[in-house]
Image: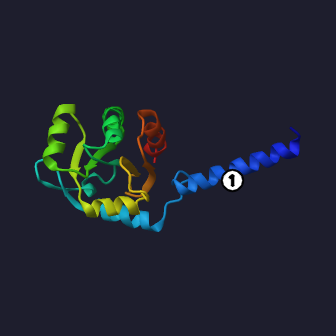
Amino acid sequence: MNRRIQAGVFLVVAALAGLAGFYFNLGGLISPAAEGAAQRLMSTSLPDLSGKPQTLAQWRGKVLVVNFWATWCAPCREEIPALMKVQVKYASNGVKIVGIALDNVDKVRDYAKELRIDYVLLIGGVETLSMAKDLGNRTEVLPFTVVLDRAGKVAHAHAGTLTEASLGAVLVPLLSR
């Protein structure tokens, strides 16, 4: 292949990668709607498994990994062990995992007990799903994870299952900030 064709192919691939990064918020380009949704999420009161209202604002100053999930969602269930490992691995560095279940509290409570989920679980509703959409979950899929930096700003959004390694790659740069 001659150099002009190679250069052309490289430019096309780079352009497509840039567009993909923009579309999936991988390039750090976060919409104003996402920033507003992050502020709403931080101040919204959601019940924990015992029914006690909680706000994410109580963890301001930590890097928050907020995972939207449901017990009926197979990929969500696959992702939970990775989230538990990340919680253990990075907790001493100021990382907090918060799962927001879009599900029935009794089902979530039973499932959390069965798996021994060791991170915070809150129960969300329709308004929470709307915030997830504003945070970048345009297709409204589960699982959906948003990472908020220590100031409560969106640092990363991901639709679909995350692995321990992929989440760690997002978190490590945020820990030094």
**Percent x, y for residue 12?**
73, 51
Query: At 41% across and 34% down in the image, what residue appears?
Result: 164
- Residue 106 position, x and y percent, is 13, 46
Query: What residue did someone put label 1 on?
Result: 15
Q: Residue at x 39, y 61 (%)?
A: 133
How far across and how far down the image is residue 46, in percent?
20, 57
Colouring convention used in this rendered image of the protein: rainbow
Number of marks? 1
Which quarter of the rendered picture does the N terminus lie within? top right
Q: Nearer the viewer, residue 83 or 151?
A: 83
* SS under mark 1: helix
For disc 1, the neighbor class at 10 Å (few under 14, some 14 to 19, many from 20) is few
* Res. 92 in view: no
Viewer-closest of 94 and 76? 76
Residue 95 vertical position relative to residue 55 in the rendered view, above or below: above
Q: What's the residue at 34%, 35% (across, down)?
A: 78
Please indicate whether residue 147 sits to the left or right of residue 26 in the image.
left
Tell me which amino acid carries mark 1. Ala
Q: Position of residue 23 (x, y in %)?
A: 54, 56
Q: Is residue 9 left or right of residue 60?
A: right
**Of residues 21 and 176, which is closer to you in this image?**
21
- Location of residue 37 with respect to 6 vertically, above or below: below
Q: Is residue 26 depicted above or below 6 in this figure?
A: below
Q: Residue at x 42, y 64 (%)?
A: 35
